[in-house]
């Protein structure tokens, strides 16, 4: 189960990286076309700066997506911990019930023997 969960998280992270890279490539291609079509040096320089800013934008997008994935992972771990605790308490309760039933049966046997 843990291996499957790790594989799923890795798949989600890879999908996130692929989406970010695809958006960045699409934006970069559009900016490059605009820069090549621009007539003035100032316009070309501004578009070149926008292209360079794409890396920062992609990094920020990665940080946000990673934070969301980490929060989802933490919630899943918390849910698993709660489920484990519930199972532990249930098991403990079952043991106590079995012990009480055994004590009750022993007491009934003792009373019948008197």
Image (tube, rainbow, N blue to C red):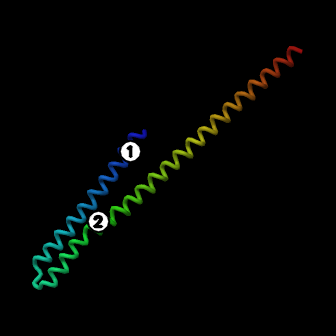
**For this view, does 105 lie left or right of residue 39?**
right
Secondary structure state at the residue bearing disc 1 = helix
Image location (x, y in percent) of residue 26: 20, 66
Q: Residues within 10 Å of mark 1 (few under 14, many from 20)?
A: few
Quarter of the picture containing the C terminus is: top right
Q: Earlier in the sequence, mark 1 or mark 2?
A: 1
Q: Where on the picture, by quarter, is residue 16?
A: bottom left
CA distance separating discs 1 and 2 = 24 Å
- Which residue is disc 2 drawn over? 58
- Quarter of the image where one finds residue 68: bottom left
Secondary structure found at label 2: helix
Q: Relative to residue 88, is residue 2 drawn left or right? A: left
Q: Is residue 79 above or below residue 99?
A: below
Query: Which residue is located at x 13 percent, y 73 percent?
Result: 33
Which quadrant of the structure image shows residue 41? bottom left
Q: Give the x, y percent position of residue 46.
A: 19, 80
Instruction: Give the residue drawn at x 68%, y 35%.
Output: 93
Q: Describe residue 112's horizontal placement relative to residue 65 as left or right.
A: right
Residue drawn at point x = 84 percent, y = 18 percent: 110
Above or below, 111 against 65 in this view is above
Residue under label 1: 6
Residue 81, given in percent of the width and then of the height, sits at 54, 45
Q: Relative to 26, does residue 47 appear above or below in the rendering?
A: below
**Front residue of this view, candidates 75 and 98:** 75
Pointers 1 and 2 in contact (CB under 8 A)? no
Q: Residue placed at 40% from the left, 44% from the top?
A: 5
As drawn, the residue found furthest toward the right would be 114
Q: Nearer the viewer, residue 64 or 23?
A: 64
Q: Is residue 18 above or below residue 113?
A: below
């Amino acid at each position: 189960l843990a291996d499957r969960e790790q594989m799923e998280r890795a798949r989600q992270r890879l999908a996130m990286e692929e989406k970010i890279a695809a958006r960045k490539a699409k934006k970069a291609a559009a900016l490059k076309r605009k820069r090549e079509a621009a007539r003035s040096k100032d316009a070309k320089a501004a578009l070149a700066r926008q292209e360079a800013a794409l890396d920062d934008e992609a990094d920020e997008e990665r940080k946000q997506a990673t934070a969301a994935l980490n929060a989802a992972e933490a919630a899943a771990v918390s849910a698993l911990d709660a489920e484990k605790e519930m199972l532990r308490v249930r098991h403990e309760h079952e043991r106590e019930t079995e012990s009480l039933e055994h004590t009750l049966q022993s007491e009934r046997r003792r009373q019948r023997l008197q």
